[in-house]
Image (cartoon, rainbow, N blue to C red):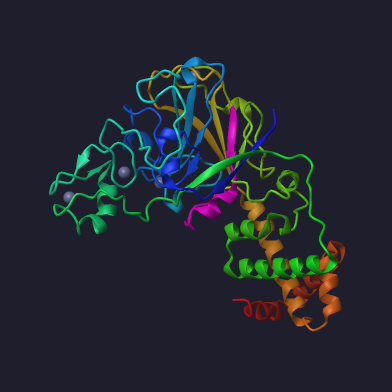
Amino acid sequence: MMVQLGYAQEQESWLLTNRFFPSKIGKKPSWLELTNIPKAEDLLCDFCQEPCIFLCQIYAGSAHVSHAFHRSIFVFICRNGKCCQENLSGNIKVLRSQLGLKNPFYPDKPAIESEDSEEIEVEVKLCKLCGCRGPLTCSKCKESNYCSKLHQKLDWGTHKLRCGISEETVDISNKTLFPEFEIVIEQENSDHVSKKESEKDAEKRRLKEYEDMVKCVEAGEMSNVYDADLNELPETKEDKKFGKFKKTIEGYEEQVLRYNRHGSPLWISDYGILDPSKVPKCSNCNGKRTFEFQIMPQMLNELENYELDWGIIAVYTCEKDCDIIGKYAPEYCYKQDLTKDDEQQSQIDMENMKASINELQQTRDDKQKVNNLNSTSKEMKESKSKIKSKQKNTKKETFEESDIWE
Ligand SMILES: [Zn+2]
Ligand SMILES: [Zn+2]
Ligand SMILES: [Zn+2]
Ligand SMILES: [Zn+2]
């Protein structure tokens, strides 16, 4: 089966309601089954015990299993950056929901795309903040519902202005949730068609890439480096998987998701690869779980949250789409990070890059040299090793040099 790639795309929010069975990132979940909505207790982070918030959902109906004609996988994550622990996924929760073609909620014909087509109402009270089940009610107005004390507290800033005064019909965008995007799916293209660049354009592009890289190095933000261009990260000799990762996504760096059901994940590092035999059995049927999709680090760029981090999040689901009878069934995910070793390596790479950039800066007027430095990686390497030895001998000088960039 071909790998399918998911891209984040801005979309009118009415097109992302449950009626259209969306795949999407951010804001509230578009629940599929509408009576057994998950509670805060189902979505507690293993580490801080606070409810996770909605990250994304993938609609992937089954053509062969009639009770899973409609099928959505929901992913939730703890907002607390401290809960992003290396190669541990206790801060992420995955749920599966499915329905037959004939079901109590949706017509068996596709919905007509019209702005008037309203969301199909959930039959239970939902948390005003996060959209999960909200059994708690604001004691003052008895209008707003919440899943947890925390979400009531987080919402109080906006709610207190209207509490008891007027009904809040409009969903005020809150800073707790992630911004909303549709996930648009495309087939992975095996032949990379690259536009023919003129030498001048290429030169411009390389300089631009360098400038972006400088900014990232300054900020020390890994997620921005992904944004700039993963391919510009110097390849670590030790990590073959990272090299493969970069090569596989080359030309399609904005992909936020890779869907490859029953295939295997595209690992981001040689370290912390999950042994498939360690994937726990389906908690409903005790059958095998297989890989379904992975969330890519590029999704981090869309979230407006600079605390969260991951390499990849690989999601494993029940192979048979077993009948969960209307329930939201937990599925398994594994988070692979760029580990300490990688970080150390990328630290070294960053330092080298800084040094190269410094050199570039010093010789800015010497255009020929700038071009050479940019155009061939061989020369890059040479200049790097030159600088490396310089660093060794005169440590203080390097510090001073890098101060320019801080
Ligand atoms: Zn947490
Ligand atoms: Zn909530
Ligand atoms: Zn109230
Ligand atoms: Zn199962």
Q: 209 left or right of 285?
A: right
Q: 85 left or right of 162?
A: right
Whether 118 is drawn above or below 35: the answer is below
Q: 207 left or right of 140?
A: right
Residue 274 colored in magenta in the image: no
Is residue 91 visible in the rendered structure shown here? no
At 79% from the left and 55% from the top, the residue drawn is: 195
Query: Residue 254 at x, y = what percent?
Result: 63, 50
At 31% from the left and 54% from the top, the residue drawn is: 172
Whether 361 is drawn above or below 85: the answer is below
At 52% from the left and 53% from the top, the residue drawn is: 302
Is residue 243 visible in the rendered structure shown here? yes
Residue 305 colored in magenta in the image: yes
Query: Residue 59 at x, y = what percent?
Result: 51, 32
Quarter of the image with the N terminus in it: top right
293 and 396: which is toward the camera: 293
How many tags in the picture? 0
At 68% from the left and 80% from the top, the residue drawn is: 401
Stretch in magenta:
291-309
Quarter of the image with the C terminus in it: bottom right
Query: Residue 372 at x, y = what percent?
Result: 86, 71
Query: Residue 306 at x, y = what percent?
Result: 49, 58
178 and 344: which is toward the camera: 178
336 and 76: which is toward the camera: 76
Whether 85 is drawn above or below 283: the answer is below
